[in-house]
Image: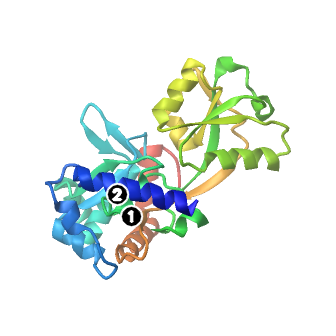
Amino acid sequence: MDMSRRQFLGAFSAVATVAGLGLAGCSGGDAGSGSASGSSESKVQAIKDRGKLACGVKQDVLGYGYLNTETNQYEGLEIDLCYQLAAAVLGTTYEEAKEQQLCEFTAVTPKTRGPLIDNDTLDVVVATYTITPEREQDWDFSTPYRTDSVGIMVMKSSGITDMADLDGKIIGVSQGSTTKDAVTQMLADQGIDATPTFQEYPDYPSINSALESGNIDAFAMDRSTLNTYMNDNKELVQPEIEFGTQDYGVATKKGSDLTEVVDDKVQELLENGWMDEEVQTWLGASA
């Protein structure tokens, strides 16, 4: 796995170099001038010099990171968290960070978020990024700011009413996610005699479209993500079975001086109740 990751990262970096990949919405060259080409270079200072925080976020998860097509603005709990982090790094207030748009947002997928941190295109990834021991070997993560669990969504007309009905069915999952392993482990832990197959897709809308068109039988992902696509024609399979519990953290470059600043801010927001208020505002639930 390490070799494939390095190969992918090398290819990605080469493409980014040729294309002059910079921060979305930034003037050309800012990302390059702010990149930490050597381990001794300060990430925090690079951000201060640039004047904006480069943030990788989701664009299709309601309540967390969502690109509102009517306003062409990102919104959600994780978007607000990015502004809090920008304020902490740039020495201003949260309100001023939002007003002055001190974050540059780039939509990420499970496959792109890590490499975009590594090549310094992004400073932070705040995108329902689950903390795992494997990922902690490659990137730094903040204290968890939110905990979620996995769900399995089906069409009500599918006839699938319990987990055992998933035997032989096709479950759509996101590329690079931990969902497949979570479902497989849950079936084993629950002693359920079911062996589904899994089909990976590059993004959530593609999985949802496959479900609605009948190309797959179920859509498995974090419940917060599934909520984006839930309607009267869909339902969760045995929602009372809690599994795949996962902690979301802010990811930063391994060994970066930005890591401590980010973690201190996240802990502060957890302690002073700001995160609880955000959860209530965007998700309508208590933390």
**Relative horizontal placement of residue 170, taking residue 103 as reference (left or right):** right
Q: Residue at x 74, y 34 (%)?
A: 196
Q: Residue at x 22, y 63 (%)?
A: 32
Q: Residue at x 34, y 62 (%)?
A: 119
- Pointer 1 local density, CA inside 10 Å: few below 14, some 14–19, many at least 20: some
Q: Nearer the viewer, residue 220 or 134?
A: 134
In what element is the residue under mark 1?
helix
Place of residue 164 in the rendered image (x, y in percent of width and height, measured from the top left): 81, 33
**Relative horizontal placement of residue 41, taking residue 30 as reference (left or right):** right
- 115 is higher (above) or lower (below) than 230: below
Place of residue 186 in the rendered image (x, y in percent of width and height, measured from the top left): 75, 47
Q: Nearer the viewer, residue 182 or 241?
A: 182
Quadrant where the image shows the N terminus: bottom right
Place of residue 34 in the rendered image (x, y in percent of width and height, measured from the top left): 22, 68
**Relative horizontal placement of residue 236, taking residue 159 as reference (left or right):** left
- Pointer 2 local density, CA inside 10 Å: few below 14, some 14–19, many at least 20: some
User: Could you give the CA–CA distance between mark 1 and mark 2, rounded to whole angstroms?
Assistant: 9 Å
Three-letter code, disc 1: Asp
Q: Residue furthest bottom?
A: 40
In what element is the residue under mark 2?
helix
Three-letter code, disc 2: Ser
Callout 1 touching callout 2 (CB < 8 Å): yes
- 44 is higher (above) or lower (below) than 60: below
Label 1 vs 2, first from the N-terminus: 2
Place of residue 230 in the rendered image (x, y in percent of width and height, measured from the top left): 53, 29
Numbered tag placed on residue 56 in the rendering = none
Q: How is the image coloured?
A: rainbow
Residue 146 appears anywhere in the view: no
Q: Closer to the observer: label 1 or label 2?
A: 2
Numbered tag placed on residue 13 in the rendering = 2
Look at mark 1 in the image and give the residue it sits on: 118
